[in-house]
Image (tube, rainbow, N blue to C red):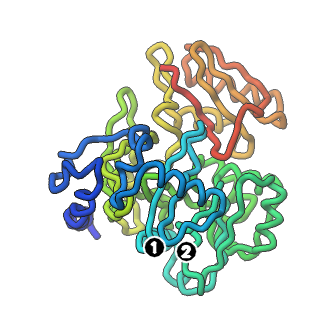
Amino acid sequence: MSPDQLAARRAALWRDLQPVLARTPALSFHSGSDLAGFPITDTASLRRDYGAWNSLGMSDATLRALAQEAEEGMASGELSAGWSTGSGGGARGLFLSRPSERADYLGQILARLLPAPDLLRRQRLALHLRASNSLYSDVGRRRFAFAHVPLGESTEASLKRLRQFDPTILIAPPHRLAAFARAGARFPSLRHLFCGSEPVSEAERSFVDDRLGLRPRGIYQATEGFIAAECVEGRLHLNDHVMIIELEPVPGTPGYRPIITDLRRVSQPIVRVRGDDYLEIDARPCPCGFAGRVIHPPQGRVTDIWYYAGRVLTPPRVVAAIEAVLGGETNWQAVAEPDRVVLRLSPCCPADIATLAARSLTRELGGTVPVVVTQDLTAWRGPKRRKVKGGNA
């Protein structure tokens, strides 16, 4: 589809969504209006009352209990609820779906990620994320065998499970793929490798590709929906065929934060929900043929932008400055404090390399604040890694 055809498709899906919005307390007053007539809602506001954000007449307390039961491995029937991985600071979102929605969601993912011939082959899909959910394990059981490998396990235990399962498709966070690469892992049957749930840099992709023999392709999902996927050309396209993603400029930067409307969500409609991620547009044309807009892979959140003495540093600039020296193999985290930046590095990083990384970051900061190096990453807690932490505005 051309961009105009995608726009026409979105308009038709928006019209079809109106009866659902009329049954959703937070949105019912505006149903039948143009999208611009709906208020913009921050994720924190949505998460205060999930009862207002579903079309099934379910209360906030009921939904939270349902999600917790799923977290503990209890069957929830046809209606599926669960918790997201979280932002890295403890905040988790609740998602809700019925079987038809899960089928639609999985269909979109498979169609965007796998070539058509591989949809017809038997596949072993390993999902290495914090918790399992029927949102993923419903995938066609006649052709797809599914295994969930929880992130709570050690790298060694996870590798043992994966070797036993011998996946043809693996989806995992970048920090775990890098850990597998450092451990010398081999997955002899692996045909497709994907990364999601946290930012991944180009240096890290190259490191994983070099060690595992496959370049991980990015999946950009959030509690608000399946936002973008990487095409065969290695470009991250917004899913403009099923989402209306408005881009709100972030002052002082070349980037945006997304305002998300999912045109296929029915049980838990998402309309004009403002996301936290910091996005930058990739204006180069893509030869893959999909007309969805292209963005650079997100490297952090809007709250992770650094402000020092009139100087603004976005997460992509911080990552580029540090990994120009460290590459993709070394674990690190850079934290903005009011009067300094703390660069936390793996104890395995040589001292001279650590010094060079700090100098590179100091240059990017223009000398506005000191960069203090500590070779200690114990302060980092999972399951979602954040390389760049900020909020010193």
Residue drawn 22% across and 63% down?
Answer: 19
Rendered position, 217 above or below 381: below
Q: Earlier in the sequence, mark 1 or mark 2?
A: 1
Task: Indicate the position of residue 99 as horizontal and vertical percent values.
Answer: 45, 73
Name the image quarter holding the N terminus. bottom left
Tag of residue 138: 2
Q: Residue 222: in sight, yes or no? A: no
How much space separates mark 1 and mark 2, taking CA atoms?
A: 8 Å
Tag of residue 74: none
Q: Nearer the viewer, residue 139 or 342?
A: 139
Q: Nearer the viewer, mark 1 or mark 2?
A: 1
- Whether residues under marks 1 and 2 lie with C-beta atoms below 8 angstroms apart, the answer is yes
The crowd level at tag 2 (other Cα within 10 Å; few <14, some 14-19, many 20+) is: some
Rendered position, 92 above or below 267: above
| Residue that sits furthest to the left in the current view | 33
Residue drawn 56% across and 68% down?
Answer: 134
Task: Indicate the position of residue 267 as horizontal and vertical percent values.
Answer: 38, 62
The crowd level at tag 1 (other Cα within 10 Å; few <14, some 14-19, many 20+) is: some
- Which residue position holds label 1? 99
Q: Residue 338: in sight, yes or no? A: yes
Residue drawn 59% across and 23% down?
Answer: 336
Amino acid at pointer 1:
Pro
Amino acid at pointer 2:
Asp
Q: Secondary structure at mark 2?
A: loop
